[in-house]
Image (cartoon, rainbow, N blue to C red):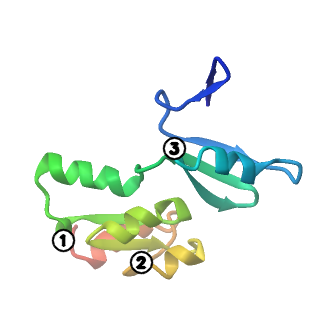
Amino acid sequence: LIRRQRQMCIRDSDKFCLCTTPESDLSGFMDKYKDKLTFIDRGNDFYEVIPVGHSKATGIRFLMDHFDIPLEDTIAVGDSTNDLPMLEYAGLSIGMKKSDAPVLNTVDYVTDTVENDGIYKAMKHFELI
């Protein structure tokens, strides 16, 4: 978050995080910047904040366009609410075991944890390796 002449400047940043307290005026801040920023609730008074119109899904779309990859050939792997746009967008979505509940309710397939080689196991399951 960069402050210049008392105005918020987000053009130099792609993401920042907020930690709130009971005294925080989060709703006021969110209301003030609702046309410019998307707030992702990560739980425990912690938020990721990104420019409106941008997400991990838009990153996938950019790569698809750049490399001429059809949607059905895309795979997203995630474990948290900040991954939901990407998981909802990809041709195949994989959630890590012990992920946030919204992730587990969204994905096509659930694999093991990162610590237990979940990504490797998912790639083997789908015969990608």
Rendering coords of residue 38 (x, y %): 54, 52
Of the image marks 2 and 3, the number of the one nearer the N terminus? 3
> Callout 3, which amino acid?
Lys
Q: Looking at the rendering, in which quadrant would you find the N terminus?
A: top right
CB atoms at circles 2 and 3 under 8 Å apart? Answer: no
The three-letter code of the residue at mark 2 reads: Val
**49 vs 43: above or below:** above
Circle 2 sits on which residue? Answer: 107
- 20 up-or-down from 15: above or below: below
The crowding category of the residue bearing disc 1, from other C-alpha atoms within 10 Å (few below 14, some 14 to 19, many at least 20), is: few
Where is the C terminus found, in terms of image quarters? bottom left
Secondary structure found at label 3:
loop
Instruction: Work out how far the residue at label 2 is from the one at label 3, CA to CA, in angstroms.
Output: 28 Å
Q: Give the class, few, some or many, for how many residues have Cα within 10 Å of label 3's Cα (few <14, many ≥20).
A: few
User: Marks 3 and 1: in contact by CB < 8 Å?
Assistant: no
Which residue has dot 3 on it?
Answer: 36
Determine which residue is flagged by label 1: 72
Q: Position of residue 21 (x, y in %)?
A: 84, 50
The answer to which image quadrant residue 94 occupies is: bottom left
The residue tagged with tag 2: helix, strand or loop? loop
